[in-house]
Structure formats: structure tokens, C-alpha cells
Image (spheres, rainbow, N blue to C red):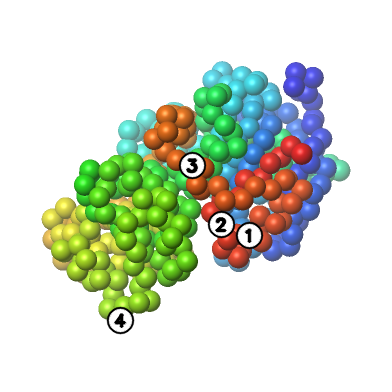
């Protein structure tokens, strides 16, 4: 890689030229990293609902042409001025949010919401100079959440890069850079169920199943999966889910069903759908006196959370979380180690693998709701 240091790299990238249209494989120029930036060679990337959401661009500012992608793993190709923690050859996970290590959030033991580098879905350029590092024939192609991993090479702020164990298989741990860590951390870092406790998981997609995996690791004795799609129940057993509730099967609110099943409510609940009714149910289904509900799913911008104040006064707790409360640089390497020491199982999340040239098939799979994570292999 040393021959490319300081040079523009021309490589393949899947470009979203306009909302909802198939990505187009293009030759793009990737500029060298500037101050506090690193250029990465992406080896594996996967598709997350967030990519599809911003590709469809139905509910937010459309920023095109753009290179999407944010769940990935790769190797450092070169580093910009001021970068001391990373070197060419390091194995890394790029992350859609960051850790500058200097702001009040980064210095707080409680927060991972870095003031400088927290997710910004509207920004299509680098923070350092307000320019894109991608171009085609001199015209800029915009970045996405600071990562843009649907490209063989990308440039990322050093604060959004987690250096990991070089022995970790990148085609597995790439899923830890977004959804799986989000669900896992929501349970382990925020809900914190104790051994033998009961946990309800609302939504059994990849994030919800990662939350269930967290409950399994924590030693919960009852993990109740709640989903409107009964076909998800069989698969969820692999992630420790012991019982299933489909709200469509009952004439009363699902929180009442769960309270009856659990003698007053579950000890912990984790909501992973983003639907406001599920959020309210997740809160109202926890036991009074000690129950904790954690919200993970992102709601519609007009959504309003309504519940009776007595639910709080009766000592239920409602919490929110972002990226599982993990600080990207400080904490994600230890999540990789959980996989390496066989505490965390990742292989069961990976249901499909495709070559980079067939990336649009991954979008089709997600739009059809088939599978959990599709790994896209960048090298033929």
C-alpha cells in the first residue's frame, strides 16, 4: 500500500445518484487523508436499514450523488497529519458516530454522544475543510455519516475509527460497527438485566435479536420476543428468545398480555422498532418498583410519547440509548473480544453474502425483509 500514500486512489464505488434508484458502480477518485483523517481500504461492508432509509430519502434532506454504507471493516491504508493512534496496516471498524476524546461527552463516563463527531446525516463533506474526498471527473460525490463504506477506499475522521484485534475475522466483526452493537449495548450497558431476570424485546430484526443476544449473555431466564411477524419467531430461538407474543393475536394491549404472563411485568424491556405504540407498550409492560424500559428505535419525527405519570411514580424507569452507549474507539474493541472469546455469537446474524458487484441485490433482500445481515465482499 505504501506506493499509494499521498496519492489520489482511483477505485470502484457504488454511487447513489438519486433517491430510490439502483446504485451505479463507478470509478471514483479518493483523495489522500487530511489533518486528523485516515484513508481505509474497505474489505467487507454490510447493509443496514439506515442505508436504505437515506437511499429512499422519503423523510429527510436528500443529499445526492452520495456513497452510502456505514457498517464495515477494513485496513488503514494511510493516515493524515496529526494521527498518532493509527498506522497503515491496522485492522479497523469505521463507525457512523465518533469519539474525539476531548469534548464534555467524551470525558463523561456516562455519554457516548461526542459533540464534534456524533452522527450527522445531512453532512456530506469532511469536518476539517468542508470538502468531499470523493470525486468523479473533478465533481464531488458526497459522503454519508462520515463513513461511506460502499467504496473500495474511503476517508474517515480518526475519531470514527475503532482499532481492533488483527486476528478478528473482518467478514464477521464488520457487523459490530452499527446495528449489532446498538442492540447488544442497549441490553448490556443500559437495561442491565440481572441473571435469572425477565426481558421483553420489541422487534425481532437484527437490532432486536442483538438485544436478545445481550439478554442471553446476561443470563436472563425469560426472554420474550414481541413482533407482528410470526415468521421471525423460529429464527429468534437461536438468539435466546424463550417465548413469543404477536400483538395481533390479542384483543387487549400487548403490555397487559405481558404483565399477565410475568406476574406484573418484565424486569427489563428493550424497544427496537421505532413505532411509538411499541415504545409505549415497552414502557408500560415493565414491573412497578424496579422495571426499566430502554428505547432504541428511532421514531417518526411527529411522534409523541404518551403515558400516565403514575407509571413513573410507581417506580418504573424509561431510558433512551444511542449506539448501545458504546464509545466507538474506547469500547468497540472490547466487543470484538467478546466475539473472539466466544461469549458473543455473530455468525448467526449473517444470513447472506454477496460480491460488491451485486450490491443492489442486498438492497432487494432488505426491502423484502429477507435475512438479517448481508455481507458484501469488496474484493472479487
If you read the primary sequence from the N terminus, does the residue marked by circle 4 or circle 1 appear first? 4
Q: Describe residue 230's horizontal placement relative to residue 313 as left or right.
A: right
Where 150 sits versus 16, above or below? above
Q: CA distance from mark 1 to mark 3?
A: 19 Å
Q: CA distance from mark 2 to mark 1?
A: 7 Å
State the residue position of label 3. Answer: 346
The answer to whether marks 4 and 3 mark residues whose Cβ atoms lie closer than 8 Å is no
The kind of secondary structure element at disc 4 is: loop
State the residue position of label 2. Answer: 371
The answer to whether marks 4 and 2 mark residues whose Cβ atoms lie closer than 8 Å is no
- Tell me residue 202's x, y (percent): 37, 61
Label at residue 251: 4
State the residue position of label 1. Answer: 365
Q: Residue at x 83, y 42 (%)?
A: 27
The answer to whether marks 1 and 3 mark residues whose Cβ atoms lie closer than 8 Å is no
Q: How packed is label 2: few (under 14 Cα within 10 Å), some, or many (20 or more)? A: some
The answer to whether marks 2 and 1 mark residues whose Cβ atoms lie closer than 8 Å is yes
If you read the primary sequence from the N terminus, does the residue marked by circle 2 or circle 3 appear first? 3
Q: How packed is label 3: few (under 14 Cα within 10 Å), some, or many (20 or more)? A: many
Where 84 sits versus 34, above or below? above
Amino acid at each position: 500500500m505504501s506506493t499509494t500514500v499521498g496519492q489520489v486512489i482511483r477505485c470502484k464505488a457504488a454511487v447513489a445518484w438519486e433517491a430510490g434508484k439502483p446504485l451505479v458502480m463507478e470509478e471514483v477518485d479518493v483523495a489522500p487523508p487530511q489533518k486528523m483523517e485516515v484513508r481505509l481500504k474497505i474489505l467487507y461492508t454490510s447493509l443496514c436499514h439506515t442505508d436504505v432509509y437515506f437511499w429512499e430519502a422519503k423523510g429527510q434532506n436528500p443529499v445526492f450523488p452520495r456513497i452510502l454504507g456505514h457498517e464495515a471493516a477494513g485496513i488503514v491504508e494511510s493516515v493524515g497529519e496529526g494521527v498518532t493512534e493509527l498506522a497503515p496496516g491496522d485492522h479497523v471498524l469505521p463507525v457512523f458516530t465518533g469519539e474525539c476524546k476531548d469534548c464534555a461527552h467524551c470525558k463523561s463516563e456516562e455519554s457516548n454522544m461526542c459533540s464534534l463527531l456524533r452522527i450527522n446525516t445531512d453532512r456530506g463533506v469532511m469536518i476539517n475543510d468542508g470538502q468531499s474526498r470523493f470525486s468523479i471527473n473533478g465533481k464531488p460525490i458526497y459522503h454519508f455519516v462520515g463513513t461511506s463504506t460502499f467504496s473500495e477506499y474511503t476517508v474517515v475522521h480518526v475519531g470514527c475509527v475503532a482499532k481492533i484485534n488483527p486476528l478478528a475475522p473482518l467478514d464477521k466483526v464488520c457487523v459490530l460497527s452499527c446495528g449489532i452493537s446498538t442492540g447488544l449495548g442497549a441490553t448490556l450497558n443500559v437495561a442491565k438485566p440481572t441473571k435469572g431476570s425477565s426481558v421483553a424485546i420489541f422487534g425481532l430484526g437484527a437490532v432486536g435479536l442483538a438485544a436478545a443476544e445481550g439478554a442471553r449473555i446476561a443470563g436472563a431466564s425469560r426472554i420474550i420476543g414481541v413482533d407482528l411477524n410470526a415468521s421471525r419467531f423460529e429464527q429468534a430461538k437461536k438468539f435466546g428468545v424463550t417465548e413469543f407474543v404477536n400483538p395481533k393475536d390479542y384483543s387487549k394491549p400487548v403490555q397487559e398480555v405481558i404483565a399477565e404472563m410475568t406476574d406484573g411485568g418484565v424486569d427489563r424491556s428493550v424497544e427496537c422498532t421505532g413505532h411509538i405504540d411499541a415504545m409505549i407498550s415497552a414502557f408500560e409492560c415493565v414491573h412497578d418498583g424496579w422495571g426499566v424500559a430502554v428505547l432504541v428505535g428511532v421514531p417518526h419525527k411527529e411522534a409523541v410519547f404518551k403515558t400516565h405519570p403514575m407509571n413513573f411514580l410507581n417506580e418504573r424507569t424509561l431510558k433512551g440509548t444511542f449506539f448501545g452507549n458504546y464509545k466507538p474507539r474506547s469500547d468497540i474493541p472490547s466487543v470484538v473480544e467478546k466475539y473472539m472469546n466466544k461469549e458473543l455469537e455473530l455468525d448467526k446474524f449473517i444470513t447472506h453474502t454477496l460480491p460488491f458487484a451485486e450490491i443492489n441485490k442486498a438492497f432487494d433482500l432488505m426491502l423484502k425483509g429477507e435475512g438479517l445481515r448481508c455481507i458484501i465482499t469488496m474484493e472479487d
